[in-house]
Image (spheres, grey):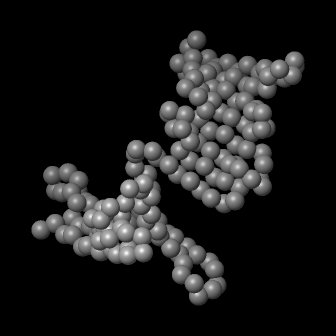
């Protein structure tokens, strides 16, 4: 099949033994399936598994989710408003190409006097120990040779991770 040839095959649910699906075949003969799952969500699947899905229930569960190449959910929007991004072993990047404007804004529109918005760094480790780092803010930039270089960081670390005697240190580190 040439790259310009496209094929769409619709398989209706005639015998009630399987859910209906639409098979789309395009470039490189790689099929993409649109399937209706048992919970009535729409699942977009390639040869390596589910790419993303959209759920019909707006009151509970994931409304929208995206899987990574290994089939593990990497992004989900839940009916309760929770947005989860899990890049597993990779970084999550938010990009902005504009000058003199915010790349990330955390906005809280509540009218009370309680803290908000809150940026929380949560180190969820099964074995906390004294001296562990709990999070960092890092400032990096390219050198004039085009290499990424760290110029400074703020690090929070446990001084004492003992329950009931918790203490921490906030460290400022600069490249000199």
Nearest the eye: 31 or 85 = 85
Residue 8 in view here? yes
Q: How many marks?
A: 0
Q: Residue at x 87, y 19 (%)?
A: 14
* Residue sitting at x 83%, y 20%: 17
- Image coords of residue 47 (percent x, y): 57, 23
Residue pictured at 36% horizontal, 68% vertical: 161
- Which of 167 and 78 lies nearest the eye of the viewer? 167
Picture quarter containing residue 115?
Answer: bottom right
Residue 117 in the image: x percent, y percent? 53, 75
**106 or 5: nearer the eye?**
106
Q: Is residue 164 above or below residue 52?
A: below
Q: Which residue, as the protein is rendered here, is positioned at the far bottom?
A: 113
Quadrant that contains the N terminus: top right
Q: Is residue 114 left or right of residue 61?
A: left
Could you say where residue 41 lies in the image, as x and y percent from the top left?
74, 39
**Residue 138 in sight here:** no
- Among all residues in the image, which is located at the extreme left? 176
Q: Is residue 75 above or below residue 96?
A: above
Q: Residue at x 41, y 56 (%)?
A: 125
- Report the quarter where the C terminus lies: bottom left
The answer to whether residue 58 is left or right of residue 113 is: right
Q: Position of residue 40 (x, y in %)?
A: 79, 38
Residue 137, relative to residue 47: is it above or below?
Answer: below
């Amino acid at each position: 099949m040439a790259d310009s040839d496209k094929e769409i095959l619709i398989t209706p649910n005639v015998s009630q033994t399987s859910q209906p699906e639409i098979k789309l075949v395009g470039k490189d003969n790689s099929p993409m399936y649109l399937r209706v799952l048992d919970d009535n969500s729409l699942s977009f699947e390639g040869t390596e598994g589910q790419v993303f899905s959209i759920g019909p229930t707006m009151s509970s569960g994931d409304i929208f989710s995206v899987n990574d190449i290994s089939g593990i959910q990497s992004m989900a929007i839940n009916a309760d408003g929770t947005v989860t991004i899990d890049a597993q072993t990779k970084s999550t990047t938010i990009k902005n190409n504009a000058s003199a404007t915010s790349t990330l804004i955390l906005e809280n529109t509540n009218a009370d006097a309680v803290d908000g918005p809150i940026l929380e760094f949560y180190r969820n480790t099964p074995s906390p120990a004294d001296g562990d780092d709990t999070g960092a803010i890092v400032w990096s930039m390219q050198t004039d040779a085009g290499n990424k270089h760290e110029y400074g960081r703020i690090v929070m670390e446990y001084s004492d991770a003992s329950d009931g005697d918790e203490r921490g240190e906030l460290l400022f580190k600069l490249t000199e």
